[in-house]
């Protein structure tokens, strides 16, 4: 069969890598893709938001299945555009992708269906928000309602910071229309875990757990980024936590969406906070995490196409989702200066060291090919993933593998997976 993948990051490279292993697939296209993806798929110059062009391309090439990697097109209704033309596509429709697209929606859903989450209020008027913040407890969390490239969440330690935040989000519209509504949320303390799942509308199958490192600098300092590294599984995601989430969060979310007439098919990514009161939902995403995909997908034993087709066909109950009994760590190699400003266009050397290896991989994010050379072309350039028998072993292997790659301005965190030491030593 022919598969089209929509997106251009490390996540899409990991998806393409898994699709490429499927016995069912003869040809992979990716729109727009990147230099790494172009080694295993034919990249086409169509943007992820160009729905008409994507649909025309899928029809012209007789694509059997399209997989949407990114949040923006999902929230914008790309799945509806494909389905309208009778094309097979994996991802939630617009009315279900709102689970990620509107924080006000997801908070209301959780409240209505008693899914554990932080206490909150929603505001459409900045004056009301300011009045509320006058008498609140600090720290407190402000969230722009809509998509804001992962940057629309402000943790405010003082009233002054919170009032500045309201101005930024609601009045200055730093995140555009995403700031038309504001969610003000109780600050939670605990360990964060990412749990991804496949959903076919009714059945949900949970993948192995992972943990992200969002801040740019070691010790979780510096600005928030798309993610500087991940490890999987999370040692903090215990059987007890799993049992709690299965009872109160996972199926409850799928059932709630169905009850609202917003049947969800695709990936639900549960951002969880393990608080002293038990696990609570921090946020939902409607797609694989990036770089969570780069540690979860390589550990998956199933043929990814079997699982995705089962979701599309509503037959996920027939799938036995299995993960390897090992661990993986992904270290992101970024351009120094990310996420603010950085130079690009430097040659990347050493990629050939990863060819044909099955315990470590390099997933491309911001790269491009020019005259046969791989060049840096973004903030997050590559994700180096390694497996190991346990997390300590995987981390050692991942950092060893990062040494195989050289480019000017290469920057990475040196403490991805440091939390592992707390439980393993
Ligand atoms: P989100 O985009 O909602 O995942 O938020 C980004 C990050 O902000 C999360 O990964 C958390 O580290 C932090 N965060 C969000 N909501 C809260 C909360 N209620 N309490 C504490 N930290 C939070
Ligand atoms: N790594 C977090 C995300 O993909 O949203």
Image (tube, rainbow, N blue to C red):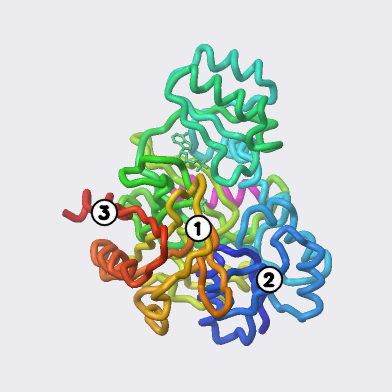
* Residue at image mark 2: 66
Relative placement, left or right, of 295 versus 424 is: right
The vertical placement of 359 against 317, above or below, is below
In x, y percent, where is residue 139?
43, 24
What is the total number of numbered labels drawn onto the structure image? 3
Q: How far apart are marks 2 and 1 (CA)?
A: 19 Å
- Point out which mark residue 290 bears: 1
Element marked by disc 2: strand
Q: What stretch is highlighted in magenta?
A: 245-258
The vertical placement of 167 against 214, above or below, is above
Q: Say whether disc 3 or disc 2 marks the residue closer to the N-terminus.
A: 2
Relative placement, left or right, of 77 versus 218 is: right
Q: Nearer the viewer, residue 381 or 89?
A: 381
* Residue at image mark 3: 420
Element marked by disc 1: loop
> What secondary structure predominates along the stretch shown in magenta?
helix
Number of residues whose C-alpha sits closer than 10 Å to that of mark 2, classed few (under 14), some (14–19) or many (20 or more): many
């Amino acid at each position: 069969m022919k598969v089209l993948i929509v997106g251009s990051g490390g996540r899409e490279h990991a998806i393409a890598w898994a699709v490429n292993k499927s016995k069912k697939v003869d040809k992979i296209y990716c729109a727009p893709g990147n230099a790494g993806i172009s080694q295993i798929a034919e990249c086409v110059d169509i943007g992820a938001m160009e729905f008409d062009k994507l649909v025309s391309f899928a029809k012209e090439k007789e694509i059997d299945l399209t997989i949407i990697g990114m949040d923006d097109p999902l929230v914008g209704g790309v799945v509806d555009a494909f389905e309208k033309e009778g094309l097979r596509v994996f991802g939630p429709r617009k009315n279900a992708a709102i689970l990620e697209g509107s924080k006000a929606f997801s908070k209301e859903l959780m409240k209505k269906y008693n899914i554990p989450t932080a206490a909150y209020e929603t505001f459409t008027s900045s004056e009301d928000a300011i009045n509320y913040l006058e008498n609140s407890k600090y720290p407190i969390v402000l969230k722009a309602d809509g998509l804001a490239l992962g940057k629309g969440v402000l943790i405010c330690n003082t009233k002054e910071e919170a009032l500045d935040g309201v101005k930024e989000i609601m009045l200055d519209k730093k995140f555009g229309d995403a700031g038309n509504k504001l969610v003000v949320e109780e600050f939670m303390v605990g360990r964060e875990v990412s749990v991804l799942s496949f959903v076919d509308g009714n059945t949900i199958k949970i993948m192995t757990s992972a943990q992200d490192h969002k801040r740019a600098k070691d010790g979780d300092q510096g600005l928030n980024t798309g993610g500087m590294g991940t490890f999987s599984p999370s040692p903090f995601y215990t059987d007890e936590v799993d049992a709690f989430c299965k009872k109160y969060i996972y199926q409850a979310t799928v059932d709630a969406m169905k009850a609202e007439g917003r049947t969800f098919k695709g990936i639900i990514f549960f951002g969880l906070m393990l608080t002293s009161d038990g696990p609570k939902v921090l946020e939902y995403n409607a797609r694989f995490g990036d770089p969570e995909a780069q540690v979860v997908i390589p550990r998956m034993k199933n043929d990814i196409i079997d699982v995705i087709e089962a979701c599309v066909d509503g037959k996920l109950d027939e799938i036995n989702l299995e993960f390897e009994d090992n661990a993986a760590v992904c270290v992101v190699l970024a351009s120094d200066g990310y996420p603010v400003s950085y130079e690009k266009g430097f040659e990347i050397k050493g990629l050939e060291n990863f060819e044909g290896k099955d315990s470590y991989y390099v997933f491309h994010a911001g790269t491009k090919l020019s005259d046969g050379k791989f060049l840096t072309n973004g903030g997050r350039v590559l994700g180096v993933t390694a497996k190991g028998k346990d997390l300590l072993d995987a981390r050692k292997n991942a950092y060893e593998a990062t040494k195989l790659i050289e480019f000017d301005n290469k920057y990475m965190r040196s403490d991805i997976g440091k939390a592992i030491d707390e439980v393993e030593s």
